[in-house]
Image (spheres, grey):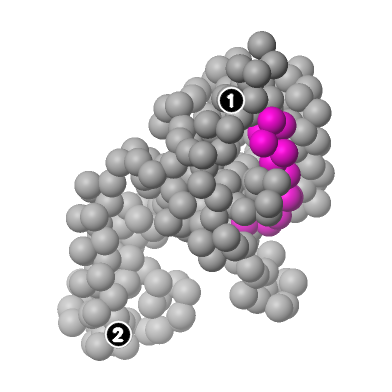
């Protein structure tokens, strides 16, 4: 019953996402539900933002079969009973789901400590406004993609290339500085990232970093206030932007 209700929810959620403004990301996951460090490391890539986005590409039935089989370890007769399909059909759905996941699965570096060290250097360079330092850490084809849902300020859905992303970051540094924003490094979705808070400690947005081969390949930002409430009080990002612009004009 739970599986079939979930399939219906997935179908309706897919329709809502088709009407969503701009790129859609899952809510950033901050808390680690697994107390066992080995279990956390094992599942880190599976709950990464990139992996969750891959799951979204599966049909609701493929996703249900994949989760029941690969995550919960049910055998095919149990899976077939849960989703109301034959065992043969469930095997085909599982094969297709595995193929889709394998084709696009992110290949993060195994050394979590190395990723965190590089992310720390990146965030330090951002705090210091060190544009050259930022540029050195970006892959040539890096992308910066934002999920604002039409409710949070952002200049564009996507920036591509080290020079473009470096320029965007360089423009963001003084804006954050003018409103006294703070950068809190955190593991999110099993990846290095950060929460940005205003001077009152309210959440402005989150960043998650995809790191491979010693460089940042992707910066995913969540600016939609509807997806940030579980991390604390959410700031009025539009008001913060207005305040930053007012401060800029007063110093020009």
Neighbour tally class for label 2: few under 14, some 14-19, many 20 plus, Cα within 10 Å: few
Q: Position of residue 151 (x, y in %)?
A: 38, 44
Q: Which residue is mark 2?
A: 2
Q: Quadrant of the N terminus?
A: bottom left
Percent position of residue 129, x then y: 76, 24
> What is the x, y in percent for residue 20?
28, 46
Residue 55 within the magenta-colored segment of the rendering: no
Q: Quadrant of residue 167?
A: top right
Q: Is residue 114 left or right of residue 246?
A: right
Q: Is residue 192 visible?
A: no
Residue 43 at x, y percent in the picture: 60, 66
Q: Which residue is mark 1?
A: 246
The image shows a total of numbered marks equal to 2
Please give the label number shown on residue 166: none
Can residue 32 be seen from the camera position used here?
yes
Q: Is 14 drawn above or below residue 164 in the view shown? A: below
Residues drawn in magenta: 176-188
Where disc 1 sits, the SS reads helix
Going 46% across and 80% down the picture, which residue do you hit? Answer: 72
Instruction: Give the CA separation, mark 1 to mark 2.
Output: 52 Å
Along the line of sight, the residue nearer the viewer: 78 or 88: 78
Q: Residue at x 69, y 30 (%)?
A: 178
Q: Residue at x 58, y 33 (%)?
A: 243
In the depicted structure, whether residue 136 falls above or below residue 52 = above
Toward the top, the furthest residue is 252
- What is the secondary structure assignment of the residue under circle 2? helix
């Amino acid at each position: 019953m739970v599986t079939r209700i979930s399939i219906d929810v997935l179908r309706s959620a897919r329709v809502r996402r088709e009407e969503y403004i701009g790129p859609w990301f899952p809510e950033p996951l901050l808390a680690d539900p697994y107390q066992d460090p080995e279990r956390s490391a094992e599942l880190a890539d599976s709950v990464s933002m990139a992996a969750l986005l891959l799951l979204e590409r599966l049909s609701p039935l493929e996703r249900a079969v994949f989760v029941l089989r690969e995550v919960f370890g049910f055998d095919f007769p149990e899976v077939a009973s849960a989703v109301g399909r034959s065992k043969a059909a469930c095997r085909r759905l599982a094969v297709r789901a595995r193929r889709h996941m394998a084709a696009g699965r992110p290949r993060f570096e195994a050394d979590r400590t190395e990723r965190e060290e590089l992310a720390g250097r990146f965030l330090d360079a951002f705090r210091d406004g060190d544009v050259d330092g930022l540029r050195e850490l970006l892959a040539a084809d890096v992308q910066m993609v934002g999920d604002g849902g039409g409710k949070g300020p952002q200049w564009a859905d996507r920036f591509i290339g080290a020079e473009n992303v470096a320029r965007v970051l360089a423009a963001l540094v003084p804006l954050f500085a003018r409103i006294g924003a703070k950068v809190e490094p955190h593991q999110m979705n099993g990846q290095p990232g950060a929460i940005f808070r205003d001077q009152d400690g309210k959440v402005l947005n989150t960043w998650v970093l995809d790191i491979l081969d010693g460089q940042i390949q992707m910066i995913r930002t969540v600016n939609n206030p509807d997806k940030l409430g579980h991390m604390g009080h959410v700031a009025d990002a539009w008001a913060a932007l207005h305040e930053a612009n007012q401060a800029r004009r007063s110093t020009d």
